[in-house]
Each structure stands twice: as C-alpha cells, then as structure tokens.
Image (cartoon, rainbow, N blue to C red):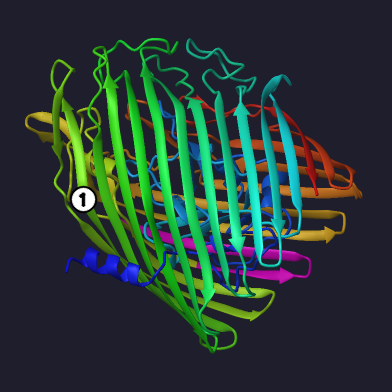
Amino acid sequence: MHRSSFLVAALSASLAAPAFAADAPEQGEAAGTFTLGQIVVTGQRPESIAVTGETMTAQAIEAFNRNHLDDAVNLMPGVSSSNSGGSRNERLIFVRGFDRFQVPISIDGIRVYLPYDNRLDYGRFLTADVAEIQVAKGYASVLDGPGAMGGAINLVTRKPAREIEVEARGTLELDRDADYAGYNAFALLGTRQDQWYAQASYARTFRDHWDLPGGFTPTAIEDGGEREFSRTRDWRVNAKLGFTPNATDEYSISYTRQEGSKNAPLHVTNPQAQAWSWPYWNIESIYFLSTTAITDDLRLKTRLYRNTFDNLLRGFDDHTQTTQTLPAGRVFNSWYDDEAYGGSVQLDYAAGGNRLSLAFHYRRDEHVEYSQVFPTGFIEPPQKSAEDTYSIAIEDRLQLTPALSLTAGFSYDWRDLRQSDEFTLNGARNGGTLFGYPLVDADTWNAQGRLEWTPDADTSAHFSLSSRTRFPSLFERFSSRFGGATSNPDLKAERATNLELGGSKRFGAVRVEGNAFYSWLDDAIVSFPFIFNDTSVSQSRNVGKGEYYGVELAVSAQASDALSLGANYTWTERDFTDPSVPAFEATGVPRHKAFAWLEWKPAGRLSILPSVEIASDRWTVNTAGTRYYRTGAYVQANLRLDYEAIDGVVLGAGVRNAFDDSYTLTDGFPEAGRSFFLSARARY
C-alpha cells in the first residue's frame, strides 16, 4: 500500500481531524481566550499590557493602537517587521531573522498558506478580534505540524467569558497635518451559557493614505505629503459556536473571512518601477476544533478545516493605472484561486506527572492560476497544482524531579505532488502549450528537546535544541520568473538547527526574562545563476548556509497601583552565504531593537501611556540587486491618553512617531511620518 493511502486510512479510522491546541501548564489561560485555538508555546503569560516573551495580549494590542499584525508583533523581543519593497510592497515579519517562508502563520491553529509562493502580506491581517498573538521562537513543538523551521505565529481569536458580552470601538486616523487619513471599526456580540457559547465579531480598517515625514526630499516620482498609492481596505468577520457538555470536553465550529484590496506605493527614485494593484485579496476558513477526555489520563484533540484564498493582481502601463497595452511580463491580469483542506488528530496520555503525545496532520493544497496577457488580451487556460502534505509526530514530557522536566519530540513529514500544470505562451502571445512539470515527492525529519528547571513559581530556566525543516514552495521549484529561471523539481527542504538558553525571574513587583539563541541554516534555498541552452537563467538550489544568533531581554514592573512600566531589547546577527552573490547580505532585520513603555494612572479614570521604539539600521539592496547598504535606523516616540467617561466607555487620543522621524527600511520605500488618532470604546 502507498504510504499516503495507508495514512489516509489511519486518519479515517481515528474518526477525527486535528488539533494543535496547547495545554502546556506553563502557558496559562486568560478569560476570553479561545484556548482550543492555541498552539504550544513556552513561558509565562505577560501581565496587563506588558510586551514580553512569546505572547502579546489583546490589552497590549489595543493600548499601543496596533491594528495590523506586522505592526503589533514588531513590539515583541526577537520579532521585527519590515517592507518587501518592489512592486509587491508587502509587510513582512521576521522571527529571530527567519522570514515568512520559514515561520508559518495560523489563525486558531489553522495554518494560513498560499500554495504557490506563500507571499503573505502581514499588513492584511487585522488584530481587533484577537485575544492574543502567540509567537514560538526557535523551538516550535512538532505536535503543531510541519514547516516551523524558525518558529511559528498564531492568532488566537476571542471567546465569550460572560453571559452577555457586547463591545464596540472605533478609531479615527489623522495624518501629520491632522487631516482625515482613515478609520478602524470593531464590533462584537457574544454569550456564554452553562453548556454552550456563541460569538460574532466584525473588524474593518480603511486607510485613505498615510503621510511621509516632513523631512522627506521630493523626487520626480514622489512629491511628499500624502504617499502615492498607499490606500488600503480590509475587513474581517469571525463567528463561532461552541458546546461544553462537561468540565473537560469542548467542541467548536468557527468561520472566518477576511477581504482586502490595496495599491502598492512606488519606488521613490526608480522611474521603471512597475505599477501593480490588488483589487481583491481574500481568505476564508471554516474549521471544527474539539477536545475530549476519553479517560482521566487520556485526551483526544481534533481539528478539521477548509480554507480558500483568491486574489487578483493587475499590472498597468504606468502609474496612472488606466491602460494595459504593453507586452506580457509587465502588464497583465493574474488570478489565483486556491483551496486547502485537511486536519489533525492528537492523543495525549498524562499520568504521574509525565505526558506522552502522538499527532498526525494531513493537508491538501490545490492552486489554480491563469493570466490575461497584453496587448492581445489573450486569457490563458487555468493551470492547476495539487499537493498533499503529511506529518506524524511524537512528543514525550518527563517530570524528572519536582523541579526538572525534559521534553523530547520527533516528527516525520512527507509531501506528494499530485499535479503541477504550466502554460507557455507562443510568440504571438495569443496561444500556447499546456504541460505538466515532473511530479517529484519529498520527505524530511525533525527532532527537538527541551530541559526546563522550575524550582519555584517565580523562577525558571530552560535549554532547548531543535532541528526543523520546511519544504520549498511551488514557486521555488517551478516558477520561470517571466522567462528568467528554470525549474528544479528535486529541490530539497532547507533546515535550521536552533539552540536556546534562557530563563525568567520575579523579584517582587519586577519580572525579568532573557534568552540567548543560535541557529545554523543548512541546504538553504537561493536563486543560483547558470547557463541553460546558451541562455543566462537562474534556478532555486540548496546551496545557501548561514548562522543567526543573538540575545533577547525583557523587564516589566508594577511600581505602584498607579504606575507600571516595561522594556525589551533584541540583538540579532545574521551571517548568510549565497555562493552566487559574493556581496550578499541578509536584509530586513535590524542588529539592535528596543521598546519601552510606561503607564501612569494619576486619577482613577485617566491613563497616560508614553512609549518609544528604537531600531538600528539594517541591510537593504538596490533595485538592480548590485549594491547592499545599511538603512532604517529610527527612534519613534508615541503617546496615548485614555479617559473613562462613564463605566465601560473610554475615550482616547494619541500620536505615533511624534517627532516625525524620517527613515527607510527598504531601498526606495520610506516609512510613514507623524500621525494622530482619536478613539472611543464601549463594553458591556
């Protein structure tokens, strides 16, 4: 029997589908958090609005006015956000130097994945309905599924905690001249009863524009002030219905849909920059999660899901975005229509302080694409790819002594490519040939261990070693890059070995934590140039290698009933070798990054929250890829004031980048200057 057929049968026999929900005792639980949707992270949950460790709470997200995922996690130690630049101009997230391909993202434990290239734009993910953001850094449990080479990010949605919950809030965004720049709105209605709960929420963000700093020097392409082509629209709805028949079991079905549209600001000095827009960028997911106590010692967790993703990318003749007449490659309409479905099942056996867990994951990804080329207007036939991914994992947590525990895990992942179509245009651009790429399968293994010492409730230390991989995307294996590349069906998974030593300690009202990390990258995927049929092209190959290392520190304190404060700092070094580019530097991550805040409540209903974000420069590369240089250092001062006018109703105002600091993270794409906001929130 084929190995995939055998495991599909095993999955069917298990009567269920999947879960990565975490119940690690270190993690804790907060009211209003959908715990079925958590993944396994280690460390203590931060208090109030403290920004530390592996979890960012809803209180912190709201307090610092972080309405998009990339903006929120940038405050966490070990995590930084950036901008892809280029015509895509997407918001990026790096975790200890690892990028969006190496750090999967999920919503309630359900992975969000784009089967062809996985070029997710993290600026499209809203945070208004998020109870917490989990970030597993380096050590990501094998029980949570494949692909977490450098860590994992999980958005945990809210769950009602009271009989009736109602919330509404809105934010008016203003630019540096205090003119209208957009708005954010959120509404939630929920109920929790003895044996069931239900909730629905809606979040919407509209950005009319954002302003460049006053110190920006105008160019022939960008005259300053309102940033050209910076308009975006996003909304998300989340609904869930849950059944809790007893104290141990829970069953929930959830639905999430998010829709977005955006333009892409242009490179400020390159007149050849392509003009692209996304009229729609939509993700939809329906999923079932459960946990069942079979006996006092045995628990079954399951998850089933179906995800869809569809978008349209348009390329225009010029920056007016009115005509499409130039040849294919620069001007086009490109449609993606993707679907994924699958699940996981996890069995936990806990007795005598030890816990043994077994997990199985299955996922089918189907990708359909087609393009309209110009000037002929010819529309290609749909091209389909289909791929199955599997993972079997085992993890054993042993309580060696009352204070010392050892967790060891191993997983085996494999992938079967079922179909991979491509269409080649003929010279006249009004027809061509449909063909299939070679169907090459792949497999890999992952292993990890973690030793944790917890002598008392205020002290912990840990040491972990993890070897994790991720499979290459269809784009890396087969994309022709508009004729400039050739395929590599045999491309292997890349691997990272992650080492970490860390700990935390509470000294009265002060809590301190820190981690030192070191990662080795092997078989890293890079675009390698060579001569094929007398033509200079590139091909994705496993020839890159590197080392990422650094330190994370965080401190938080409740100085008095009226005063709390905190800070975190990250030092990151990345040494990466690309044999095809002698001058190559790993871009997008600052060497030094820090965040500090202070919350003062001088009166019972008034809150004053100043904060500061600091980053050193980072590597970037020019459009031609010929010159690497450092840029992007900034110091941003922020301030928020909140006043509770009546019980449950809070009015607020604030400023971001108060001193209008001018900085650029990516060559040719300056960041926003000073902005203001007014907010209102009502809860019952």
Judge whether 480 appears above or below 497 on screen: above
Horizontal and vertical percent position of residue 284:
47, 43
Q: Is residue 523 visible?
A: no
Q: Residue at x 52, y 39 (%)?
A: 258
Q: Is residue 655 magenta?
A: no
Q: Is residue 27 left or right of residue 277?
A: right
Judge whether 589 appears above or below 48 on screen: above
Judge whether 483 appears above or below 503 on screen: above
Few, some or many C-alpha atoms within 10 Å of disc 1 (few <14, some 14-19, many ≥20)?
some
**Which stretch is magenta?**
501-523
Judge whether 534 appears above or below 360 on screen: above
Q: Is residue 515 magenta?
A: yes
Q: Which residue appears farthest toward the right when viewing the image?
A: 603
Q: Is residue 174 left or right of residue 437?
A: right
Horizontal and vertical percent position of residue 562:
87, 54
Horizontal and vertical percent position of residue 26:
60, 71
**Disc 1 target residue:** 418
Q: Is residue 660 visible?
A: yes
Q: Residue at x 55, y 86 (%)?
A: 353
Overall secondary structure of the magenta section: strand
Q: Locate the N terminus and report the quarter of the image it occupies.
A: bottom left
Q: Residue at x 41, y 29 (%)?
A: 88
Q: Secondary structure at mark 1?
A: strand
Pick whichever, 583 or 309, lies toward us.
309
Disc tally is 1
Pick whichever, 3 or 28, lies toward us.
3
Pick whichever, 456 or 104, lies toward us.
104
Type of amino acid at the residue the image marks with label 1 = Arg
Horizontal and vertical percent position of residue 459:
65, 75
